[in-house]
Each structure stands twice: as structure tokens, then as C-alpha cells.
Image: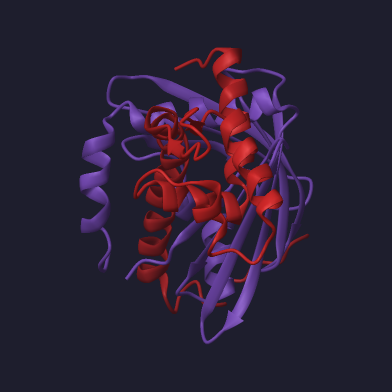
Chain colours: A red, B purple
């Protein structure tokens, strides 16, 4: 699977957008349905302007869209984009999870043996 | 119960980091990284046999190994262990021979949490964002070609004892 550079770029923007905990919470909120900036700002102890900025970052990353619906302009999740992203991060996670579960198993079977018993010196 | 894996790809930077705890003392976790016979049992994606050509986990040491699946597809990796400090830290270069000259720098920190528990932190630096995503994607592909669903199905069943 070779990813084309344009797709890579979009992926980077999306990951950058999701690197922030406030933005992740906004995404989580939007997964339950569209919301206005006011509604999104409610649970946070930050200004509405700051929340608007977060939403703009999410918008640029194509993770959310805003409809020109009168003054309300509710924010919607862009599920396609999110799904593509989830696949990327999930795969990364999955590979490492598998690997570390195998390491768990190795460590389980090695308890007592690996526990300092097999020390070798670092340099000879 | 499985310890959670935390993965983070920081904003606009060619890094990937992870954090994972193990119910084993730091010596054991370190040993599982040092002893090639143990490394072979866990390193790499599911569904691939790991074959180690060289693996000398010490400062100035080097490694070369391959992951091969039952279709005969083989992926070879090599690098050097720049610094290895027992039960504490290691930093190594990492290169997939399918993407020559694109080298990441992988840091690992072994942290003794007491009560026979260890936290492993990994931190990889890539030459570019493109390299990060490309390398991760190609690494992923190896694991994934066997089928995402199947892998998912396998994971919960491995939660118990070995």
C-alpha cells in the first residue's frame, strides 16, 4: 500500500488536528450529532473564540463541516474522513498491540528466568 | 487484562511515540529486547516468521532480520544500536531495505515502576512526515495483508496466559 503524497498531506493535517485533547472532545461530542459553537463551547473552560479556532482547525483537516444554516451554522462530523484516519491509527495501534501481547506472553513464560537471572555483561 | 497501548503522532512533526506497561520487572522486559531467541518470539507483525541474521543489542552493535509470511514475501530490516543502557534505554537506527536510505531513529526507555511492573516508552523520529507515514503504512501492510478482521479476532483470545 503506497499512499499518494496528497493523501499523506491530508492525513497529516487530520492527525495534527486530533493531537489536541480539546479537539478530540469536540469530535466526540459531534459523534452524537451536529452542534453549534455555543453548544460545543459549553463543557470547556475556554473562550468561545478559542473553541472557534479549534473548530477551524478541524474544518481545515476536513474532519468537520459547517452548514450555512442561517446564524446557527451547526458543525457536523465528516465521518468518511474520520474513518480513513481511524484506519491509519488503528493499524498502527493494532500492529503494536499484537506485538506487545506476544511480548506479554514471552514475559509470562519467562517470569523468574528473565528476572535478573540471565544477566550478561554489556561489554566484554 | 491487557495493558493499554498509547500511541501518539504529534502535530506536524515526523514523530511517532507509544507507551505501554508490562506486568513484568524491567530486567525481564529488557532481556526480551536483548536476547535474540526471545526477540524472535514477539517482534514484528502477526503472521510473519522472524528470522534473525544478526542481533547484537549493545552499544555499537547491529542487527539485520527479516519477516517472512507463508506466501514467501520477505521484508528485511537492518540498523545499528547506537546506545544501549541495561534496563534503562536504547536508541537504534531502523531501515526497511524496501525503502533504502530512509532511516528512522528509534528510542526506547525502560522504566521500573516497582512491584514488578515496567513502562516501555518508544519514540521514533523520521527524516520527514512523508517518511513517517510511508514507513508506518508499509509496516502496517505487512501485518494487515493477512486481514484486519482476522487479526482483530485473534487479539482478545490472547489476553490470557500464554
List the single residue furthest toward the bottom: B115
The answer to which quarter of the image holds residue B148 is top left
What residue is at 54 percent from the left and 32 percent from the top?
Answer: B136
> Of residues B57 and B112, which is closer to you in this image?
B112
> Of residues B119 and B69, which is closer to you in this image?
B119
Q: Position of residue A57 (x, y in %)?
A: 64, 37
Q: Position of residue A115 (x, y in %)?
A: 52, 77
Q: Where is residue A52 in the image (x, y as percent from the top left)?
A: 64, 45
Above or below: residue B58 compared with residue B115: above
> Of residues A46 and B126, which is closer to you in this image?
A46
The answer to which quarter of the image holds residue A7 is top right
**Quarter of the image with the N terminus of chain A in it:** top left
What residue is at 51 percent from the left and 51 percent from the top?
Answer: A26
Left/right placement of residue B12 relative to residue B144 reads: right
What residue is at 55 percent from the left and 53 percent from the top?
Answer: A38
**Quarter of the image with the C terminus of chain A in it:** bottom right
Left/right placement of residue B5 relative to residue B121 reads: left
Residue B10 visible from this viewpoint: no
Left/right placement of residue B65 relative to residue A104 reads: right
What residue is at 63 percent from the left and 36 percent from the top?
Answer: A56
Q: Where is residue A97 in the image (x, y as percent from the top left)?
A: 41, 51
Amino acid at each position: 500500500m503506497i499512499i499518494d503524497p496528497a493523501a499523506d498531506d491530508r492525513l497529516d493535517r487530520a492527525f495534527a488536528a486530533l493531537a489536541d485533547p480539546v479537539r478530540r472532545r469536540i469530535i466526540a461530542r459531534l459523534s452524537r450529532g451536529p452542534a453549534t459553537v455555543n453548544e460545543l463551547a459549553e463543557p470547556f473552560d475556554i473562550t468561545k473564540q478559542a473553541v472557534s479556532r479549534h473548530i477551524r482547525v478541524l474544518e481545515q483537516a476536513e474532519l468537520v463541516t459547517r452548514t450555512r444554516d442561517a446564524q446557527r451554522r451547526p458543525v457536523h462530523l465528516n465521518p468518511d474522513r474520520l474513518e480513513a484516519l481511524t484506519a491509519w491509527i488503528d493499524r498502527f495501534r493494532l500492529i503494536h498491540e499484537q506485538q506487545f501481547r506476544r511480548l506479554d506472553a514471552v514475559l509470562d513464560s519467562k517470569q523468574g528466568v528473565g528476572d535478573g537471572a540471565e544477566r550478561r555483561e554489556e561489554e566484554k | 487484562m491487557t495493558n493499554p497501548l498509547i500511541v501518539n503522532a504529534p502535530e506536524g512533526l515526523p514523530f511517532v511515540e507509544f507507551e505501554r506497561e508490562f506486568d513484568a520487572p524491567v530486567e525481564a522486559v529488557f532481556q526480551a529486547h536483548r536476547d535474540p531467541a526471545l526477540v524472535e518470539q514477539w517482534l514484528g507483525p502477526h503472521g510473519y516468521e522472524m528470522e534473525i541474521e544478526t542481533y547484537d543489542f549493545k552499544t555499537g552493535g547491529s542487527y539485520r532480520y527479516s519477516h517472512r509470511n507463508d506466501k514467501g514475501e520477505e521484508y528485511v530490516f537492518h540498523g545499528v544500536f547506537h546506545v544501549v543502557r541495561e534496563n534503562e534505554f536504547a536508541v537504534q537506527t531502523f531501515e526497511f531495505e524496501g525503502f533504502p536510505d530512509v532511516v528512522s531513529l528509534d528510542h526506547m526507555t525502560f522504566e521500573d515502576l516497582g512491584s514488578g511492573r515496567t513502562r516501555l516508552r518508544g519514540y521514533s523520529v523520521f527524516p520527514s512526515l512523508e517518511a513517517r507515514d510511508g514507513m508506518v503504512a508499509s509496516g502496517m501492510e505487512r501485518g494487515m495483508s493477512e486481514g484486519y478482521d482476522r487479526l482483530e479476532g485473534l487479539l482478545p483470545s490472547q489476553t490470557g496466559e500464554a
